[in-house]
Amino acid sequence: MLPVLQIGPVAVRAPELALLAGLWLGLEIASRAGKRHGLDPDRIYSIGFWSTLGGAVAARAAFVWMNLSIYQQIQPVSRALLSAISLSPGTEIEWIGLLVALLIAAALTRRWKLPALRLADAFSPGLAAMAAAVSFANLLSGEAYGIETSLPWGISLWGAQRHPIQIYFALAFIGILVVLWRWQDRPNPAGMLCQWFLIFSGMTILLIEPLRADSPLVLNDIRAPQVIALVLVLAAMGGFALRAPSRAEVSPP
Amino acid sequence: MPKTRFDWIIITALAAILGSLWIGMTRVQASAINPTGRPPSPELGFPTPDFTLQTLDGKAIRPGDFAGKPLLINFWATWCGPCRAEIPALELASQQYRDRAGILGINVQEPPALVAPFVTEFEMTYPVALDAQAEIAHAYRVRAFPTSFFVNAQGIIVQIEAGAISDALILKRLGDLAGE
């Protein structure tokens, strides 16, 4: 765990630094993958950049709007404004950010008349890289930590030997990245790489999340990330079902 | 690989059933959700480790003095820029939630002669305790300044923030814990 890098008088938050590096790496991988799919790498960079920026701004703006009374208490006004645009995290409404990011990506895709499924394929390895970076950032911040273990590779965190699930997640997503990168050159139908990304990522979360000690919960004791992961896996498999030929089309008359 | 649409539908249905069963089997145990009875430890979901320190005016202070109210324990030092930036927000929160939440500043390894003028200059009215030997900072595994522990009214640590946090986050978290 290394939450803050103290460089002289300057305190740099290491997890956020890892996230920024992950964003850059993910966009770089996505743009290179896009080139292989016949897409303009600059367009991919632009979509990734504007979606991320728009999503981040929207997530913060939504928090400020919904907690306006808190900001009104902060005096002087300049300090309240600084708080609203502060780079330190924790005051965001994530689902609104995600929704706005997706809307921006959809709008740009439409405006530039890009093939949406090919674009999703191009972004898939990049998203795997970003997910690995998020896991690494969690390792630095000590968040999303594992349950206690006596296994020899347990790490000392928050007062106990724990499963290094941030490392498990990071390795799994790096594995997904490698597989997707290799599969790019196959003659895949448009959208198939993205479907595999959803299936592999969903399975990863379904399997590793039970080792997490601080999962967000729904319905008292159900781990929310597992529910979302199962929905994504089923949606991707449903996509394969829609794409597959019927029995009548396969069997000879 | 499944070949037909029917094969995929069967596999998807199986995945839905097996996935749901797996989620049910791996749901969080009730004992892990409710940590009452766990030994005190400076980590999320655990009761706050107890300690007694002297404030600047010589009074003894401990987390138990804030029993029944949410508490923000803030480890800081005068030389730390982000700590200084946070203090006006902590002071505002202290005024705002005077009767409903507590704030305890713990200055680490600095002499009272240095801390007292600083407290006056920054008009800090919430209690500031002196951890002269950094024993409490070590016990709380503080690795960076500032570090803040948000503790709920039951004395359980619900959030740990290493590094500076925004004014809004301090007010929002304390407000939420105070039941606003």
Image (spheres, coloured by chain):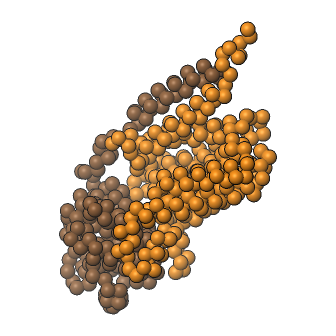
Chain B appears what colour?
Answer: brown
- Residue at the far front: name it: A111
Residue at 46%, 57% (x, y): give it: A93
A46 and A161: which is toward the camera:
A46
Residue at 66%, 19% (x, y): give it: A246
* Figure quadrant of the N terminus of chain B: top right
The spot of residue B176 in percent (x, y) is: 31, 61
Q: Is residue A201 left or right of residue A154?
A: right
The spot of residue B160 in percent (x, y) is: 39, 63
B49 and A222: which is toward the camera:
A222
Q: Quadrant of residue B50?
A: bottom left
Q: Tell me: residue A226, above or below residue A105.
A: above
Chain A appears what colour?
Answer: orange
The spot of residue B87 in percent (x, y) is: 37, 79
Res. A4 visible in picture: no
B179 and A230: which is toward the camera:
B179
Residue at 73%, 8% (x, y): give it: A253
Q: Is residue A85 left or right of residue A104?
A: left
The spot of residue A144 in percent (x, y) is: 46, 52
Q: Quadrant of residue A189?
A: top right
Res. A45 visible in picture: yes
Residue at 25%, 80% (x, y): give it: B55
Q: Quadrant of residue A203?
A: top right
A150 and A186: which is toward the camera:
A186
Q: Tell me: residue A253, above or below residue A64.
A: above
Task: Report the number of discs.
Answer: 0
